[in-house]
Amino acid sequence: QSEMDKIRAEEKAQYATNSKDMEQGLEGVKLALKVLREYYAKEDKSHDAAEGAGAGIISLLEVVESDFTKGLAQMTSDEEAAQTEYDEQTKENEIERATKEQDVKYKTKESVDLDKAAAEAASDRSGVQEELDAILKYLEKLHEQCDEKAE
């Protein structure tokens, strides 16, 4: 998870820097288009000779504007997808971690219960063995007293 956090932070920082640059570029192109359109929209005939070149430059800037807009939209879309994927993976990791922690908790409890049961069983066996030894000893005594021996 920590590696994912680091990678995600780097991606986000890169997006912030790149999107800012793209937005500034887009604003610059829009401003240039505005200035050129205003210039060529004037009734002043001093730029009649450059009218064709102006239209070409405006067309080129419109293409650049379109490319910047598409690039910015793609960057934003990629960032949103990466953030969504990161959020989903983080949620899955949290669930998996909680599940594993619960497993450890239950298995630790089960281990303690089994240790306790084993200790009780060993104690019970010890008590039963003592009883058996006493009964066998008493039985042997009875055999000595009650069994007839041939002389």
Image: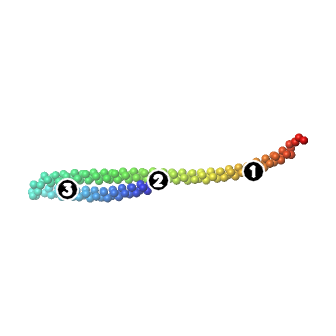
Which mark is drawn over residue 94? 2
Q: Which mark is residue 33?
A: 3
The picture places residue 3, in percent across and down from the top left corner, at 42, 55
Q: Amino acid at mark 2?
A: Glu
Neighbours of disc 2 within 10 Å: few (<14), some (14-19), many (20+): few
Residue 144 in percent (x, y) is at 85, 46
Q: Which secondary structure lies at badge 3?
A: helix
Which residue is located at x 54 percent, y 52 percent? 104
- Marks 3 and 2: in contact by CB < 8 Å? no
**In front of the other: 89 or 34:** 89
Q: Is residue 137 left or right of residue 90?
A: right
> What is the quadrant of the N terminus in the image?
bottom left
Q: Secondary structure at mark 1?
A: helix
Which of the two residues, 119 or 19, is positioned nearer the viewer here? 119
Percent position of residue 136, x then y: 79, 47
Q: Amino acid type of disc 1?
A: Glu
